[in-house]
Image (cartoon, grey):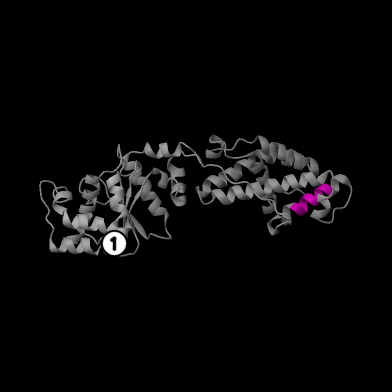
Amino acid sequence: MSLNESREVLKLRDDELEELIKKWIADKLSEYVGFDRNSGAGDRGLDAVGFLSAERYEGKWDNYQCKQLSKSLGEPEFFTELGKVFYYASIKEFSCPNKYIFVAPKGIARGVRKFIGMPSQLKSEILDNWDIRCSENIVSNQKISMSTELREVVMSFDFRKIEAWNVHKLVEIKSLRKVLHEHVDIDPGIAPKGVVPDAMTDTEENYIAQLITVYGSHSAQTFPDLLSVLRDPDYGPDIQDQRRRYHDADAFHRHFRDNIPDGILQQFNQDVYDGIISDYRSSTGYARLNAVMRAAATIQVSGIFEKHKRAPTSVKQGVCHHLANEGKIKWA
């Protein structure tokens, strides 16, 4: 995991943080059916909103209140923002949110943490100390008293659904990391190494069958199966290297397909293809295999993988076997 990704998020302006969360909500199509973004004066305590139903503000919705502050979120602003939402819900401008999440990269003050951790105490604090905590901070030059409707809204809200996300939480949410990669220069991190199973997997059959043919042609002998190649003192170590490369590339793709936009991985594969194809077309057989492996080792891919040095040689070489599986190149 990169050590500088948190700093990149902390560099965002308040409006950029709101835009980031809005884009993340818009990308979560399996959870949200729509989104809205409110910002500036008169936002009624709403920033980035995710709608859970077509009824929008009349149905269930989640509020993401973005606070890119110079310090941790303190009690005055915490209670003010909650008070705004409860007040405007009480006068029927919208239903009360399903969840209320403070997105505060620099974290929350100790008192705020205590209240979020004790939901029943937070509810009592708002009900008992509304005049002190909220009443004069909702509408300019106006004191908002605790009305019967407002008390009913506060009483009905589930305070267990108030959360606070600091920068460390933000950069660990997989779906949010995909959006971060599109808009913030963060290190993608290190993918796990692949594990080479003793027995050939179904996904290996194609490229391994081609390699067995290549080894047989080069040595003028017949290898009936993978086991016979593994027993050979010359080709056994070679095919083990090829399998290690294949599984490293497989682990690389499985890891990053959940963490970065699909287009980045597609471009990575295209870069490998473009980097090896001339050597591939210039030779045949065992010489072709070795030429392609050498070419793959020297490829400089574009984008984040090259910038942050996160594409090992074995992965780039392993991609070539995946290309062979897909029929884009052939070993034999």
135 displayed left or right of 67 = left
Crowdedness near tag 1: few (<14), some (14–19) or many (≥20) residues, C-alpha within 10 Å = some
Which element carries disc 1, helix, strand or loop?
loop
The residue located at (68%, 41%) in the rendering is 277
Question: Count the marks: how many?
Answer: 1
Against 89, is 252 above or below? above
The residue located at (56%, 44%) in the rendering is 267
- Name the residue carrying label 1: 158
Against 152, is 223 above or below? above
In the displayed image of the protein, which residue is found farthest to the right?
220
The stretch drawn in magenta includes residue 170: no
Looking at this view, is 130 or 252 the one in front? Answer: 130
Which span is picked out in magenta?
A: 208-215
242 displayed left or right of 228 = left
The stretch drawn in magenta includes residue 212: yes
Looking at this view, is 298 or 100 the one in front? Answer: 100
Q: Is residue 328 at least partly visible in the picture?
A: no
152 displayed left or right of 61 = left
- Residue type at mark 1: give it: Asp
Looking at this view, is 129 or 79 the one in front? Answer: 129
Q: Is residue 275 at least partly visible in the picture?
A: yes
